Image (cartoon, rainbow, N blue to C red):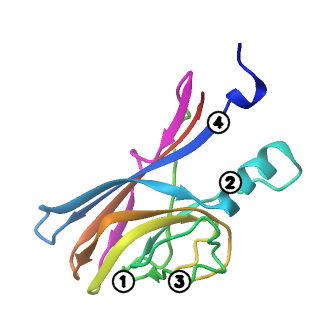
């Protein structure tokens, strides 16, 4: 017999980041799970079950080296910084497809990947989801942060494509 504390719901997010050189050839790729920050988890509950206003726009940002922690927010993430060596004026919009699934629900942006045209030299160590599209800004809410297995170098002329898969599963 199951008890109330035997049921859980988990939020898991997978990030695939692929870097292409100026010649169009794949240089490297990463596939990693992200940390859902407390601020992001609280918003899921507040915006779904309570009276908080739903955030309808989420944006993908790039992060530098440093380990994210669950208490990170957009206003305070002292162990890492946002990287902005790309020509787009704003963080890229997370445009999700339909939610699918029966026991595990997922949605992703595979039909509209967040794409960055790199215009400088940098070391990218991960990415994040924010409710603010303002490049380099500390405003908005932080949903989650992904850390790569190892930091990766990019140079001017590279292109990064970011696919985010959001999953909620009950067990």
Q: Badge 4 local density, few (<14 within 10 Å), some, or many (20+)?
A: few
Q: Which residue is mark 3?
A: 136
- Specify the quadrant that holds the C terminus: top right
Q: Badge 1 local density, few (<14 within 10 Å), some, or many (20+)?
A: some
Q: Which residue is mark 4?
A: 9
Task: Kindly indicate the quadrant of the structure image that contains residue 156.
Answer: bottom left
Task: Kindly indicate the quadrant of the structure image that contains residue 127.
Answer: bottom left
Which of pointers 2 and 1 lies earlier in the amino acid sequence?
2
Q: Secondary structure at mark 4?
A: strand
Q: Secondary structure at mark 1?
A: loop
Q: Residue at x 46, y 73 (%)?
A: 67
The answer to which of 79 and 146 lies nearer the viewer is 79
Which of pointers 4 and 1 lies earlier in the amino acid sequence?
4
Nearer to us of marks 4 and 3 is: 4
Determine contact: label 4, label 1, CB under 8 Å: no
Q: Which residue is mark 1?
A: 85
Q: Badge 2 local density, few (<14 within 10 Å), some, or many (20+)?
A: some
Determine contact: label 1, label 3, CB under 8 Å: no
Region of the chain picked out in magenta, as a range: 100-119
How many labels were placed on the picture?
4
Which of pointers 4 and 3 lies earlier in the amino acid sequence?
4
Across and down, in percent, residue 32 comes to 37, 54
Q: CA distance from mark 4 to mark 3?
A: 33 Å
For residue 41, which numbered disc appears in the image? 2
Which of pointers 2 and 4 lies earlier in the amino acid sequence?
4
The answer to which of 56 and 74 lies nearer the viewer is 74
């Amino acid at each position: 017999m199951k008890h109330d504390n035997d049921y859980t719901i988990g939020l898991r997010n997978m990030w695939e980041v692929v870097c292409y050189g100026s010649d169009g050839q794949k240089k490297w790729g990463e596939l990693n799970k992200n940390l859902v920050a407390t601020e992001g988890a609280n918003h899921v509950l507040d915006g779904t079950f309570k009276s908080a206003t739903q955030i309808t726009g989420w944006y993908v940002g790039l992060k530098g080296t440093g380990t994210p922690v669950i208490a990170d927010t957009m206003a305070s993430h002292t162990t890492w910084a946002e990287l902005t060596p790309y020509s787009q004026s704003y963080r890229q919009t997370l445009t999700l497809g339909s939610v699918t699934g029966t026991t595990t629900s997922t949605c992703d942006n595979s039909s509209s990947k967040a794409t960055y045209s790199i215009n400088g030299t940098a070391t990218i160590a991960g990415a994040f989801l924010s409710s603010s599209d303002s490049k380099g800004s500390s405003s908005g809410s932080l949903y989650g942060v992904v850390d790569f297995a190892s930091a990766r170098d990019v140079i001017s002329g590279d292109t990064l494509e970011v696919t985010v898969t959001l999953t909620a599963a009950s067990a």
